[in-house]
Image (tube, rainbow, N blue to C red):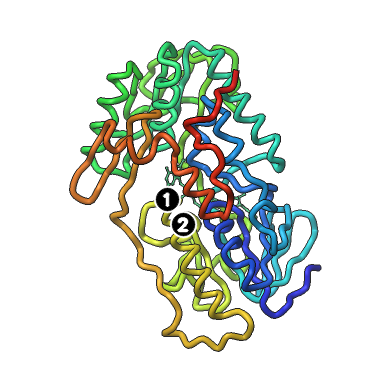
Amino acid sequence: MLRSTGDRVVIVGGGIAGALLAKTLQNHADVVLIDPKEYFEIPWANLRAKVDPAAVERTVVPHTDYLTHAKVVTASAVGIDDSVVLTSIGRAVAYDFLVIATGRTCTRPQKQSDRLEMFQRDKDRIDGAASVLVVGGGPIGVELAAEIVMTCPDKRVTVVHGGPRLLKVMGPRASAKALEWLRSKNVTVLLDQTVDLTGASPDGSDETRSFTTSAGETVEADCHFVCTGRPVASGWLKGSFIEEHTDEEGHIKVDDHLRVGGLKNVFAVGDITDVPEAKQGHLAQRQAMVVSRNLRLLVKGGACKEEKLHRYKPCPKAPITVTLGRRDALAELPFMTLIGHIPGAVKPRDLFISRTRRMMGLKSSRPYGNMPRAM
Ligand SMILES: Cc1cc2nc3c(=O)[nH]c(=O)nc-3n(C[C@H](O)[C@H](O)[C@H](O)COP(=O)(O)OP(=O)(O)OC[C@H]3O[C@@H](n4cnc5c(N)ncnc54)[C@H](O)[C@@H]3O)c2cc1C
């Protein structure tokens, strides 16, 4: 049992929100981070990493590189009561303050080296394929199709999407522009169709095979990637006192201070929350910073008045940018939708990797665009 110290903050989930919170709080409280992975990963770099793994070395970072004053428990949280988090390794971790930041369900290897190998395996699969199937036309599917076609224009890429338009998190203008852009690069886009993946290997590493869509079309593909939405990772909260504060999709209901169920010491941040805004990394980081500031006021017996606590203001109209290879992007701003090199000048080259590393107190290291390519 890791006992409480009076100012113990236990953060469950070492993703974009939880890792930043742990990093900014580690010198102000007794911080324990619980995460099944030994590393922090910048998720929006992992699509480019599939075609250029040279990018991954600086986007997959051991937690211990930026958490010099916090404890890391490498395990999944499997249960919770009003003072203790139970973990998959049988260790109970007592808390005074708890922050839930488990994002979306996702299976990742425990070790950094295994994660880097995964990227290389994906690259090898793409390199060895003449045709690639991307299942799902949300931001992840569109970005992946664009990365593949811009890096390897000789590949036949097909995107199959279950809805009537791509990118439903953006407006119809953005959807139309994305469709036109992909088709201009010879990507086949099938809308309003789903793919029967019965019998396909979960990691998409099949030999050449045919996929049948719900409209009866056949797609031949040497490899495939599933880029459909993942449910939020709140299953471990089932049967706990938090469950009654979740909605039907598993999001945790939070108040203006990102606290849960009116409790003074339990917070949630990031994709797991029901905050009415798009689930994006930069918004998860903003939420983490609000909770970080509030916890600094509350730990060490801080008798902080309610009105002094910071509030989180949701951003339902936050701009969304979808990267389209290394030079182009699609950006939906409050008053216009842009596609091409102009929005592309902002994000695609570095994918905000240097900025994210700086936020985590890590050296920015070589700019991604200058890194040598893998042979
Ligand atoms: C491929 C991809 C591209 C994206 N592109 C962008 C982009 O360009 N811009 C943008 O703003 N956003 C982007 N996003 C969205 C962004 O990454 C998410 O909004 C953000 O990661 C949410 O942060 P989070 O901390 O809530 O969850 P996550 O980053 O998903 O982290 C959740 C953490 O919780 C851990 N965890 C899960 N279950 C447990 C458990 N039971 N016990 C302990 N730990 C647990 C996981 O290991 C993980 O470390 C992208 C996402 C993906 C997947």
Secondary structure at badge 1 equals loop
Name the residue beneath numbered marker 1.
280
For disc 2, the marked residue is: 284
Q: Quadrant of residue 152?
A: top left
Tell me the number on the disc at residue 143.
Answer: none
Q: Is residue 144 above or below residue 87?
A: above
- Label 1 beta carbon within 8 A of ligand 1: yes
Which residue type carries mark 2? Ala
Label pair 2/1, CB-CB below 8 angstroms: yes
Q: Is residue 177 above or below residue 126?
A: below
Residue extending farthest left: 335
The answer to whether the beta carbon of the residue marked 2 is less than 8 Å from any atom of ligand 1 is yes
The quarter of the rendered structure image containing the N terminus is: bottom right
Residue drawn 32% across and 35% down?
344
Q: Position of residue 128 (x, y in %)?
A: 56, 13
Total labels drawn: 2
Is residue 199 visible to us here? Answer: no
Judge by depth and name the residue closer to the eye, 134 or 354: 354
